[in-house]
Image (cartoon, grey):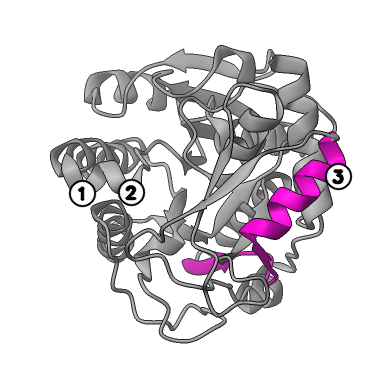
Amino acid sequence: MKVLVVGGAGYIGSHVTRCLLDDGHSVSVYDNLSTGCKENLFPEATFFRGDILDYPALLNVMQTGYDAVVHLAALKAAGESMVVPQKYSLNNISGTLNLLNVCTECGTKNVVFSSSAAIYGEPKYLPIDENHPCAPENYYGFTKLEIERFLDWYSRLKPINFAALRYFNAAGYDLQGRIYGLERNPANLLPAVMEVAVGKKERIDIFGDDYDTPDGTGIRDYIHVTDLAKAHLMALNYIAQNSTNIKINLGSENGISVLEMVEMARQVTGKAVPARVVGRRAGDPARVVASSKMASSLLGWKALNSDTQSLIESTWKVYQKTL
C-alpha cells in the first residue's frame, strides 16, 4: 500500500514508519518537525514538511493518491492541555478534521488513528477493556475521544475505514538501533530516569510511595514502541482487508511499578540513579493495566518485547549514543 504517516518524524511515528517500510509498503512522512526529529527520517520514505492545519499543503501531498493514512500528529501533554485547551482544540481536533476532509476529497479510504488510554479516565475496574466507560479527566484525553466520534461519523457518511488504537504507556526504542532521535521535553517516567542516568538531571522524583501496590509506588502498563509499531501495521492490514472499523487497546497487560523501573534502570545502566519520594500527584490512580484481548483475537497481536529489561536496555543504548 501507499501510506502517508502524519507525524512520522516523532517518537512513535518513526517506529511506525520503519515497520511499514520493513513490510514493503511505499511510505511518505508528513511532519512539521515541531516535536519530531530529522534524525528519525529514513531515506526510503519521502518526506514532506508541513502542518495538519495547512489544508492546501495537505491536499497537495495527498492528491497524488494514498491508500492509507496513519495519523500520529497531536499535542499530548495532559497537564498543558488543562492550561491552554485552545492549543489542543486547534491542533488535535481542527487538524484531524482537516486530515479527514482531505482523505474524503482524495479518496483515501483507510485511517489508522493514534488514540489514547486517556479517554478512559480513572479506572473503574482492572484490567481496562474496550467496554470501560470513557470519562477523560484531562482535555488531551477529551480531544482523543472526540476524534474517535468524528471517525465514527465519517465512516458512516463516507467510504472510510478506521482503526482507533488506544495506547497505554509507550516506551523503549527500536531493538535494532535504527532510531535514535530523542523526544523533546519528555514527560514520561523512562526518559526522566534516563536523563538522571546520563547526568542531565540530578534525580528522579517518585510521586508517592504509599499506594496500595506491592512496593507502594504507582503501577502502569508499558508497551514497547516496537510492539506498538507492529500493531499499527497489523491494524492497517486488518481494516483494509475487511473494510471495517476497530477500536482496540494496546498494552502489555503487565503492570510495572515506578520503583521496579528505577531499580532495573540501575541494574542496566550501572548508575546510581538517585531518587526521592515526593507527594502524590492529584488524579494519579494506584494501578492502571490494560486488557489487550481484542487486539490478540482480531489481529493476532501480542506485546512480545514489553518486559522491563527490554524497555530499559533499548532506551539506554539510545541515550548513551546521543547524550
- The crowd level at tag 2 (other Cα within 10 Å; few <14, some 14-19, many 20+) is some
Q: How many angstroms separate mark 3 from mark 1 (CA)? A: 37 Å
> Mark 3 or mark 1, which has the lower sequence index?
1
Q: Nearer the viewer, residue 18 or 222?
A: 222
Q: Secondary structure at mark 2?
A: helix
Q: Which residue is mark 1?
A: 82
Q: Position of residue 235 (x, y in %)?
A: 60, 57
Q: Secondary structure at mark 3?
A: helix
Q: Which residue is mark 2?
A: 78
Amino acid beneath label 2: Ala
Dots 3, 2 in contact, CB < 8 A: no
Q: Position of residue 33 (x, y in %)?
A: 43, 18
Q: Please indicate, yes or no, whether residue 227 appears anywhere in the rendered image.
A: no
Q: Residue furthest bottom?
A: 125
Amino acid beneath label 3: Gln
Q: Please indicate, yes or no, whether residue 171 appears anywhere in the rendered image.
A: yes
Q: How many angstroms separate mark 2 from mark 1 (CA)? A: 7 Å
| In magenta stretch: residue 17 | no
Q: Nearer the viewer, residue 122 or 133?
A: 122
Q: Which residue is mark 3?
A: 267
Q: Where on the picture, by quarter, is residue 21? A: top right
Q: How many angstroms separate mark 3 from mark 2 (CA)? A: 31 Å
> Mark 3 or mark 2, which has the lower sequence index?
2
Q: Which span of residues is magenta-colored? A: 245-269
**Residue 135 in the image: above or below residue 315:** below
Q: Nearer the viewer, residue 180 or 64?
A: 180
**Residue 282 in the image: above or below residue 186:** below
- Tell me: 248 left or right of 57: right
- Tell me: 113 left or right of 189: left
- Tell me: 243 left or right of 74: right
Q: Position of residue 127 (x, y in %)?
A: 57, 81
